Image (cartoon, coloured by chain):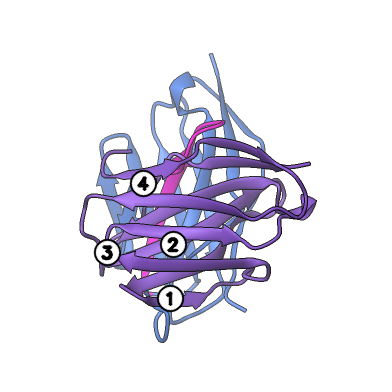
Amino acid sequence: QKEVEQNSGPLSVPEGAIASLNCTYSDRGSQSFFWYRQYSGKSPELIMSIYSNGDKEDGRFTAQLNKASQYVSLLIRDSQPSDSATYLCAAKYSGAGSYQLTFGKGTKLSVIP
Amino acid sequence: DAGITQSPRHKVTETGTPVTLRCHQTENHRYMYWYRQDPGHGLRLIHYSYGVKDTDKGEVSDGYSVSRSKTEDFLLTLESATSSQTSVYFCAISEVGLGYTFGSGTRLTVV
């Protein structure tokens, strides 16, 4: 069973702080990883993708991948109230059906003004 | 959700009736997916398509069927709706190497 695990939260951080969201995955053959943001009542929106070990930065967002530990994280710097949402981690597995994503259940982030 | 639309956005139907949800894309992406999202379960794959008339089952396919007669359209049918199929349904599209783009979702209530 291919699984993606996330802490459901809620994770509360003060405005301006760094929010750290974590995700682990079960299949060592996973190739690609994605972070989605989902506001309440809306559809998921892709914010970051990462394919190689290390860090990838895009504005206030940094995705980190450690394939040896099967661990993916998302850092949000200078958190804003508008970042309050549920963040979904997803993994694309290798092999048959490799175009499918498996999603974690999401971590709810609350940024307190 | 530029390039992908779902219809209807909301639907209430009675137990035992058939229901069809439509996903339409203008991106010419090869892959299309239907997910359902429920509290405590996250997004779960119902069916997916990797080309015209090429479809396969996901993890929660019982009670659902799909069809894809054109690249741009992917239909999800609930053969005989049950209360357990009350959910939010999302369609998504993708190409090789890319993440998904999701539609706005359909909120289905089975009474």
Label 3 or label 4, whichever lies nearer to me, is 3
At label 2, the amino acid type is Tyr
Label 2 or label 3, whichever lies nearer to me, is 3
Label 1 or label 2, whichever lies nearer to me, is 1
- Using the image as rendered, state which of residue A14 and residue A49 is in the foreground: A49
* Mark closer to the chain start, 1 or 3: 1
Q: State yes or no: residue A37 in magenta.
A: yes
Q: Tag 2, which chain?
A: B
Q: Are marks 3 and 4 on the same chain?
A: no
Q: Are marks 4 and 1 on the same chain?
A: no
At label 4, the amino acid type is Leu
State the extent of the magenta-drawn residues as a range: A31-46
> Residue under circle 1?
B55
> Residue under circle 4?
A46
Label 4 or label 1, whichever lies nearer to me, is 1
Above or below: residue A19 compared with residue B59: above
- Using the image as rendered, state which of residue B17 and residue A38 is in the foreground: B17
Tell me, what hue is chain A?
blue
Residue positioned 36% across, 42% down in the render: B5
Q: Label 4 vs label 2: CA separation?
A: 16 Å
Q: Tag 3, which chain?
A: B
At label 1, the amino acid type is Thr
